[in-house]
Image (cartoon, helix red, strand yellow):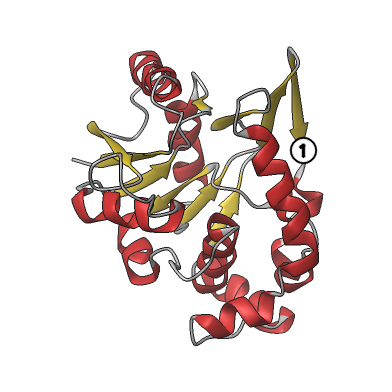
Amino acid sequence: MTECSIVIPVGRGHEKLVERAERSVEEAWTFSKGPFSSIQLLRQYDSMDGVTEAWGAAKTRNQALLKAEGDWVVFLDADDWMDRAAFLSLSLAIDLHPRASGIWGLWTRWHKGQVHKRDFEVFSWERLIDVKNPLGVGMSGAFRMDPVRELWFNERLDFCEGTEFCYAFAAANWCACVDQTLIVVDGDSPGAIGKRQGFKVARRALQLRELWQLRGRYPLLEDELIERRGADAV
């Protein structure tokens, strides 16, 4: 019996959008349960009462993780939605990469009535520390719960906490990328402009070594990554 927790952090102004996100999960579950026997939908607001000062995305996700019961977890922003075939795609990906602790789907964005997709040339696993474009690494993936709880989200970061989490997770765990869409980012949502502005800041300020130092670790060197991947393939 394998359960998947779906964590949906809800910020101010996303109260109506979160219903769409939850419907997308239910529709995906109806289409195919994939490798999971059950799902747990966790709607987590960004403060204790929805009125006081917001916690921020990192603490909001961490609060949800305290209640998560799944063996896997998917982080779905309230203004995005899950692809209809997401659970089926995850089933195929887990069968193909049984040792993977993290599986990223194809980065997909909806904007002005069109779907835009990015390949993974911007996120080469063998050159993880050379990644320059944060758009290549987002929360559009599924993660095994145990290593997530070894890492958590860094609540000291004011921006790009999701990107930092993904980099740190990938440095510590065997991960895989697949060419199927799991999550669709809504580029037309009210929060989309803020997301794009955040990425502009990240391109200037996201220094990988500094972020890893905050966690008391350093990113693996390229030869260490290749050596680890070779050992996992045996």
In the displayed structure image, the side of residue 46 where residue 182 appears, left or right: right
Q: Residues within 10 Å of mark 1 (few under 14, many from 20)?
A: few
Q: Position of residue 165 (x, y in %)?
A: 52, 62
**Nearest the eye: 95 or 201:** 201
Q: Position of residue 13 (x, y in %)?
A: 46, 29
In the displayed structure image, the side of residue 36 where residue 87 appears, left or right: right
**Nearest the eye: 3 or 164:** 164
Q: Position of residue 25 (x, y in %)?
A: 38, 23
**Nearest the eye: 53 or 110:** 53
Tell me the SS state at disc 1: strand
In the displayed structure image, the side of residue 128 where residue 167 appears, left or right: left
Residue at the spot x=45%, y=22% of the render?
17
Residue at the spot x=72%, y=83% of the render?
223
The residue that label 1 is drawn on is: 118
Quarter occupied by residue 6? top left
Q: Tell me: residue 71, above or below residue 164.
A: above
Check disc 1 and give the amino acid type: Arg
Q: Decide if residue 227 is in sight here.
A: no
Q: Tell me: residue 63, above or below residue 194.
A: below
Q: Decide if residue 102 is in sight here.
A: yes
Q: Tell me: residue 68, above or below residue 91.
A: below
Residue at the spot x=66%, y=41% of the render?
194
